[in-house]
């Protein structure tokens, strides 16, 4: 792993008025490897309105389901993850190494850039117990 990524936990909870609020917790930095998004992934994500930009590869033990990350001052939303168990162990046993040998257990985080100037702090939205959505102030 040769780069640093900030994982930002996001917690959703009800406030005193019963409105769901989303808040960011303290970010933590982890080592990562950064890769480009392949053509198939780019095309398939684009058909669903997603603009993929990077694939961040992190150790599985360091990832706790975060859906927001920061890389080099930019915020990204994780739209898909892919866990690869025990990657490269066969290559290591045979004495060969590959550019795809990321370690014993890793997760690929597929990310799209958060758009607009308010992307880092989108307007709060909430929901009620009956499942209806309301806008926050």
Image (cartoon, helix red, strand yellow):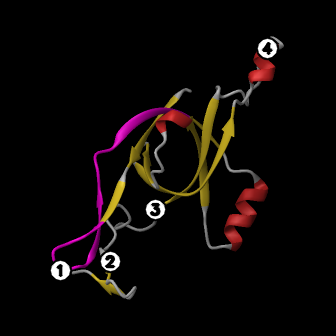
When the figure is inspected, residue 45 is found, relative to residue 10, above or below; the finding is: below
- Distance from disc 1 to disc 4, alpha carbons, whole Å, reads 58 Å
**Viewer-nearest of labels 4 and 3?**
4
The extreme front residue here reads 129
Label 1: which residue?
Answer: 17
**Magenta residue check for 116:** no
Q: Residues within 10 Å of mark 1 (few under 14, many from 20)?
A: few
Dots 1 and 2: beta carbons under 8 Å? Answer: no
Query: Between disc 2 and disc 3, whose residue precedes?
Result: 3
Query: Between disc 2 and disc 4, whose residue precedes?
Result: 4
79 or 43, nearer to the observer: 79
- Distance from disc 2 to disc 3, alpha carbons, whole Å, reads 17 Å
Dots 3 and 1: beta carbons under 8 Å? Answer: no
When the figure is inspected, residue 93 is found, relative to residue 3, above or below; the finding is: above
Please tell me whether mark 4 sits on a helix, a strand or a loop. helix
- Distance from disc 4 to disc 3, alpha carbons, whole Å, reads 41 Å
**Magenta residue check for 18:** yes
Please tell me whether mark 3 sits on a helix, a strand or a loop. loop
Query: Quarter of the image containing the C terminus?
Result: bottom left
Query: Between disc 1 and disc 4, whose residue precedes?
Result: 1
133 or 52, nearer to the observer: 133
Residue 63: horizontal and vertical position, in percent?
49, 41
**Viewer-nearest of labels 3 and 1?**
1
Residue 125 - label: 2
Dots 1 and 4: beta carbons under 8 Å? Answer: no
Q: Residues within 10 Å of mark 3 (few under 14, many from 20)?
A: many
Please tell me whether mark 1 sits on a helix, a strand or a loop. loop
Q: Is residue 119 left or right of residue 104?
A: left
Q: Which residues are magenta?
A: 13-32
Residue 114 - label: 3
Label 4: which residue?
Answer: 93
């Amino acid at each position: 792993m040769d780069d640093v990524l900030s994982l930002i936990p996001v917690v959703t909870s009800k406030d005193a008025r019963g409105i769901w609020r989303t808040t960011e917790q303290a970010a933590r930095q982890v080592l990562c490897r950064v890769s480009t998004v392949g053509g198939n992934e780019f095309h398939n994500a684009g058909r669903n309105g997603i603009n993929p930009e990077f694939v961040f590869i992190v150790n599985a033990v360091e990832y706790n389901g975060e859906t927001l990350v920061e890389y080099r001052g930019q915020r990204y939303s994780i739209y898909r993850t892919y866990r690869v168990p025990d990657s490269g162990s066969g290559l290591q046993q045979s004495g060969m190494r590959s550019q795809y040998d990321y370690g014993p257990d890793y997760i690929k985080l597929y990310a799209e850039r958060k758009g607009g100037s308010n992307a880092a702090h989108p307007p709060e939205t909430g929901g009620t117990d009956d499942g209806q959505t309301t806008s926050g102030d």
